[in-house]
Image (cartoon, helix red, strand yellow):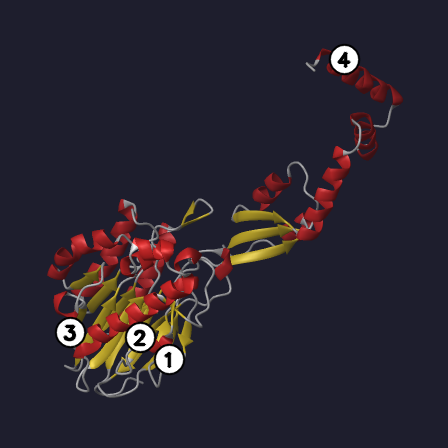
Amino acid sequence: MRENGDVLLLHTADWHVGKTLKGRSRLEEQRAVLAEITGIALNRQVDAVLLAGDVFDSAAPTADAQRVVYETLLTLARAGIEVIVIAGNHDHARTFEALRDLMAQVGIEYAGRLSPATAGGVHRFTARSTGERAVVALLPFLSRRGIIGAAEIVTGTESANAGRYEESIRAILAGLAGGFSPETVNLVLAHLTTTGGVMGGGEREAQTIMEYHVSPAVFPPTTQYVALGHLHRRQQIQGPGFVPIHYAGAPLAVDFGEESHTPVVCLVEVAPGSRARVTDVPLAQGRRLRTVTGTVEELVAGAPYDGDYLRVVVREPTRAGLRDDILAALPDALEIRIHPDFQAHHERRRADHMARSPHDLFVDYCAEAGLADPRLTALFDELLEESNATSPA
């Protein structure tokens, strides 16, 4: 239950609007998921929505993808909700910054790049429900090159660069949190990877692992809630003291590696000087991703699959027409694989074929097809001999 005096926040991240899956557009699903998130925000009468980066899947989103996002943000802002958005590694930071003043005119904070606390790096607002003041430190995605000079990247050791990245993030957050006080709700909104975080399956590994990790200890102890984006799995990170550090996760599985996730948004209740309480609200929109395994007969018998997108693992050797047979029965199969057991069998058979003569292979084929006839074999041998005689050396 929401307690008197608590500011109510909705934390979401990693929308990846415009993301396709195996060439299949998911824009209508994404529109439905964002409408569901908007409905939760309106029905719960939240004070603010915190969107922690990777709003788009591409630095050059299509016009349709932009329309879906901007309509959602405008709907929230027009309802009197404070809307605070930062760029992630998939977003185009300079485009965010170019739109920042325009977005501010309609009540949306839209931060693409790191700024000093006095020049846009901190967003302040007054909660409409309680009148409490909130301070939000904004940390959009920051690459190594944004901190470490090109020469250091080339000549420095990996451990040294990693340490420099973490220490720089620590110093940046300390500067941004300079305005935190016991009389305000103190929040950090960031797009980064914390040590101990578990990847969801659809992230860009090059911008998630190795030197991009930072310790949870980088977050100032005066922070009452850390709203993170970047890792697609919903999770809480153990931070210093009582600082609650949360990844909201992606609201729609972006890859089959995320098929087991339960998408949610986080509702956060917090007042000055108190610990934040977090409630997960599951999201029901969007088609499920599912991996199914079996023979073609078993897979077809298991249909329908409730409109889920499928990754099909076939427990049969590959053959001509196999893919067509599956797609005819399962049009939502986006990926088709041969089970490793049968793939190994196929590779062994292929290697065996490469070592045998065309005559022997043809004889085996005729036997399998029930066409064993010495006359047919003799005709094949004649054609093969003629082909070999006329082929260039």
- Estimate the spatial distance between the alpha carbons at disc 4 and disc 3, rounded to whole Å: 86 Å
Spatial CA distance of label 4 from label 2 is 76 Å
Q: Residue furthest top?
A: 390
- Indicate which label's residue lies in the foreground, 4 or 1: 1
188 displayed left or right of 14: left
Q: Are marks 4 and 2 in contact (CB under 8 Å)?
A: no
Which one is nearer the viewer's eye here, 75 or 345? 345
For the residues carrying marks 2 and 3, which lies nearer the camera in this image? 2
Which of discs 2 and 1 lies nearer the camera? The answer is 1
**Of label 1 and label 3, which has the lower sequence position?**
3
Between marks 1 and 3, how big is the CA–CA gap? 26 Å
Q: Secondary structure at mark 3?
A: strand
Q: Is residue 296 left or right of residue 238?
A: right
Sequence-wise, which precedes: disc 4 or disc 2? 2
Please state the horizontal and vertical placement of residue 138, each as a whole percent of the image.
23, 68
Residue 125: mark = 3
Please say whether residue 152 is visible from this viewpoint.
Answer: yes
Query: Residue pushed farthest front?
Result: 155
**Badges 2 and 1: C-beta atoms under 8 Å apart?**
yes
Task: Give me the C-alpha separation between circle 4 and circle 1.
Answer: 77 Å
Residue type at mark 3: give it. Answer: Phe
Residues tagged 1 and 3 counted as in contact (Cβ below 8 A) = no
Density class for disc 4 (Cα within 10 Å; few <14, some 14-19, many ≥20) is few
The residue positioned 38% from the left and 65% from the top of the image is 160
Q: Amino acid at mark 1?
A: Gly
> In this figure, which residue is indicated by the disc labeled 2?
226
Quickly name the residue at label 4: 386
Query: Which residue is the site of mark 1?
Result: 239
- Please tell me how crowded label 3 is: few (under 14), some (14-19), or many (20+) other residues with Cα within 10 Å: some
Upstream in the sequence, badge 4 or badge 1?
1
